[in-house]
């Protein structure tokens, strides 16, 4: 029979095993009785600079789910920052609880103190369940926060920068597949026309692409029809459309066994995070089907680039110009994937790891 003491030891050792497997640097468990705050900050890798990643507030089913999420997300930030050429490491925070019920000024200021205690090793930002107002409160306890409102020197809504990066990543893929990066006349289906998808449609229409849109939100669709005369596709028919480019800009995991089997496009390039339901299986499936996949964490890095720019005095032009690099990096990844006959997501991971390893060797202190 397993005793409670044994179970606790096993749980701790399982956690350490996971931390060792992917080489996490530091996990901070934060609790405050007075406000009821329960949060976890995970710092995955700070070889390239301080770990930057948003604070997600979510009513997790249990603490285990929160740990899994913060570990997965913080590691993802390491790769995103590395591939984007930023002097940033990967980190993330999660706050456990319903944002509609628990948040208050005191609550967020207390969380800010935990961030402050890390002396700049972790920089926080907005994410699902937190807002620019929360960042303002956090900023009362620490300077290690970005994503502040524009009037406070922040970068404002990052979506235009994100959409620009997605558009450029898509163009780099078009250059490879069609021999030209001009998207004029290309049939592009944008799934999810929210903040990023809407701006992406604007870039595409201006270039003369034939844009189709799909969304659960009828109002968002109507706006696209009214403004751009975009064609509307039923959600259930998105994956079987006869198109050139599919741009997932809504939810993750839309590239799975079922959807890939139906896809008729030659490029997938969109903003949604974690588009491949299972990286190793579905990245390979797309490659075998001859569909060029633009790794999401690379081409949607405009949001991170935007908050990074805040660290040195925000300027939208600088953010946009940094995002331009996404075109060249996408080309580099396509070339590496071809040379090594590997899926593009794998080439992107490899390039990110190579940069971290090379910089790690010269032992830079940020
Ligand atoms: P958003 O909430 O403004 O827009 C998402 C849109 O998708 C909405 O119009 C929504 O109605 C629609 N949608 C939701 N469920 C759908 C479904 N099942 N099918 C079709 N449409 C659906 O979000 P956003 O800021 O535009 O972000 C879009 C995606 O890009 C998200 O996955 C986000 O994580 C990712 N992303 C965004 C940024 C950024 O700067 N905003 C940066 C990096 C990654």
Image: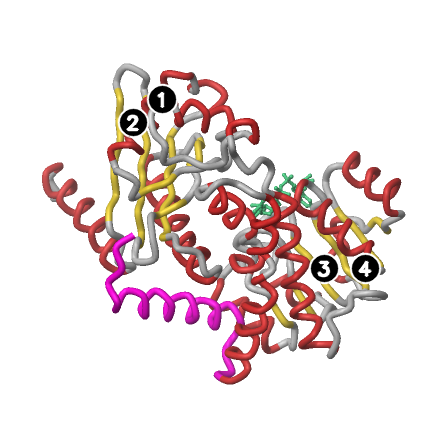
Few, some or many residues within 10 Å of mark 3 (<14, 14–19, 20+)? many
The residue to which callout 2 is attached is: 113
Q: Please tell me which residue lies in front, 20 or 78.
A: 78
Q: Main secondary structure of the magenta part?
A: helix
Q: Are marks 1 and 2 in contact (CB under 8 Å)?
A: yes
Estimate the spatial distance between the alpha carbons at disc 1 and disc 4, rounded to whole Å: 46 Å
The residue to which callout 4 is attached is: 207
Disc 1 versus disc 3: nearer the observer: 1
**Mark 1, secondary structure of its residue:** helix
Residue 239 tag number: 3
Residue 220 tag number: none
Q: Please tell me which residue lies in front, 306 or 44.
A: 306
- Residue 262 lies in quadrant: bottom right
Q: Give the image location of residue 362, x and y in percent.
A: 26, 67
Estimate the spatial distance between the alpha carbons at disc 1 and disc 3, rounded to whole Å: 45 Å
**In magenta segment, residue 349:** yes
Instruction: Give whichever of discs 1 and 3 has the lower sequence position.
Output: 1
Disc 4 versus disc 3: nearer the observer: 4
**Image point 48% across, 40% down: which residue?**
313
Instruction: Give whichever of discs 1 and 4 has the lower sequence position.
Output: 1
């Amino acid at each position: 029979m397993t005793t409670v003491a044994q179970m606790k030891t096993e749980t701790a050792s399982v956690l350490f095993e996971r931390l060792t497997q992917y080489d996490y640097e530091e996990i901070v468990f934060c609790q405050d009785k007075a406000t009821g705050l329960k949060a976890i900050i995970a710092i995955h890798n700070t070889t390239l600079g301080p770990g930057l990643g948003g604070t997600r507030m979510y009513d997790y089913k249990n603490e285990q789910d929160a740990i899994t999420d913060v570990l997965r997300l913080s590691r993802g930030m390491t790769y995103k920052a590395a591939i984007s050429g930023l002097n940033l490491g990967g980190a993330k925070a999660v706050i456990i609880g319903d944002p509609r019920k628990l948040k208050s000024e005191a609550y967020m200021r207390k969380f800010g103190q935990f961030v402050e205690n890390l002396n700049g090793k972790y920089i926080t930002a907005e994410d699902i369940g937190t807002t620019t107002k929360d960042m303002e409160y956090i900023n009362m306890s620490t300077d290690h926060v970005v994503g502040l409102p524009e009037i406070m020197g922040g970068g404002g809504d990052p979506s235009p920068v994100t959409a620009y990066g997605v558009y450029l990543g898509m163009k780099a893929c078009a250059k490879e597949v069609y021999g030209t990066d001009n998207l004029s006349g290309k049939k592009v289906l944008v799934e999810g026309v929210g903040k990023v998808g809407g701006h992406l449609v604007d870039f595409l229409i201006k270039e003369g692409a034939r844009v189709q849109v799909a969304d659960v939100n009828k109002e968002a669709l109507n706006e696209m029809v009214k403004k751009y005369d975009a064609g509307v596709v039923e959600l259930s028919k998105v994956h079987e459309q006869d198109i050139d480019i599919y741009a997932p800009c809504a939810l993750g995991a839309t590239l799975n066994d079922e959807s890939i089997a139906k896809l008729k496009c030659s490029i997938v390039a969109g903003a949604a995070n974690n588009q491949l339901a299972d990286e190793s299986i579905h990245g390979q499936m797309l490659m075998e089907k001859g569909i060029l996949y633009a790794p999401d964490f690379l081409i949607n890095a405009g949001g991170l680039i935007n908050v990074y720019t805040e660290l040195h005095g925000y300027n939208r032009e600088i953010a946009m110009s940094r995002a331009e690099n996404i075109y060249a990096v996408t080309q580099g990844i396509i070339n590496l994937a071809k040379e090594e006959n590997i899926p593009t997501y794998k080439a992107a991971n490899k390039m990110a790891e190579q940069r971290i390893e090379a910089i790690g060797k010269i032992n830079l202190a940020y």
